[in-house]
Amino acid sequence: MSAEASDAKFGEQGFAILNQGKPEGRMLDALTSDEWRAVALSLRVSFWATLLSLPFGIFVAFALARWTFRGRQVLNGLVHLPLILPPVVTGYLLLLTFGRKGVIGQYLDQWFGIVFAFRWTGAALAAAVMAFPLMVRAIRLAIEAVDPRLEEAASTLGAPRLWVFATVTLPLILPGIIAGGILAFAKAMGEFGATITFVSNIPGQTQTLPSAIYAFLQVPGGETQALRLVLISIFIAMSALLLSEWLSRTVARRIAGR
């Protein structure tokens, strides 16, 4: 019996035949639907992870840079902990906390119907946690570079603290906010360990760009698709870094020229 006939026989019985040893496509072929879905989902996850964590990043960065309070070093350690812990550990902690039976996740599910585990929203949460330290670090450095006497001068004129921050501090740290946001976006695009632990690797639902690369490398003949996604990842990361540098310099020149 020929190989084609054998494959057809197995197919009639409901078995899927892997295309072993055969290339999935050439490097210059158009992206497949699975590849497009992975790229689109990664962009969606990274966008929301960055957007929703940015206000918290600004607040925490300002607190670490300007305030003196008990537990300041503990907060600083917690913020930077995801950079030190293995990403799988962070993903497991997220699962224990925000899973359906987690410490917080069970109440979010019961009271509000919000579920993070094994959803794309969970991928955004994991990416935000992993990217948060980079965002806070960039914004904190920008705040520390602002002369506190400028803020004190505005306060002595009777301006409320929130108004001083909005009109004095915020414009001066805008380059740092832009840099932190774009770096966080790039980090979120490349997040793998915490994401796959927390939301698994479900094609079309939680399979981000790194997860898709990993999945293609596990299938015979998937090296070409994996390499295409690797090149896309490199292009997005480099574009984000260059855009961050350009925007930061542009905004800084405009502020200096006022």
Image (tube, rainbow, N blue to C red):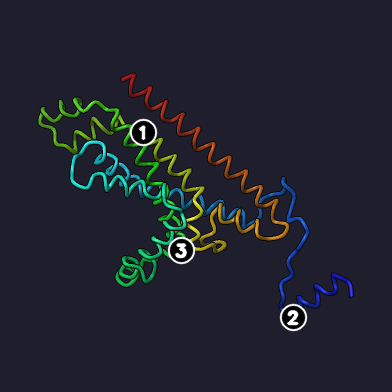
Tell me the amino acid under the disc marked 1. Gly
Q: The N terminus appears in which quarter of the rendering?
A: bottom right
Question: How would you rate the neighbour count of disc 1 (Cα within 10 Å): few for under 14, some for 14-19, many for 20 or more?
Answer: many
**Depth order, front residue of 38/183:** 183
Q: For this view, does 255 lie left or right of residue 219?
A: left
User: Residue at (27%, 28%) from the top-left corner?
Assistant: 146
* Numbered badge on residue 119: 3
Chain-order first, disc 3 or disc 1 = 3
**Vertical placement of residue 181 versus 172, above or below:** below
Chain-order first, disc 2 or disc 1 = 2
* Numbered badge on residue 189: none
Inter-mark Cα distance, 2 to 3: 33 Å
Residue highlighted by disc 1: 176
Residue highlighted by disc 2: 13
Inter-mark Cα distance, 2 to 1: 60 Å
Q: Position of residue 156 (x, y in %)?
A: 10, 28
User: Residue at (37%, 31%) from the top-left corner?
Assistant: 175
Tell me the amino acid under the disc marked 3. Arg
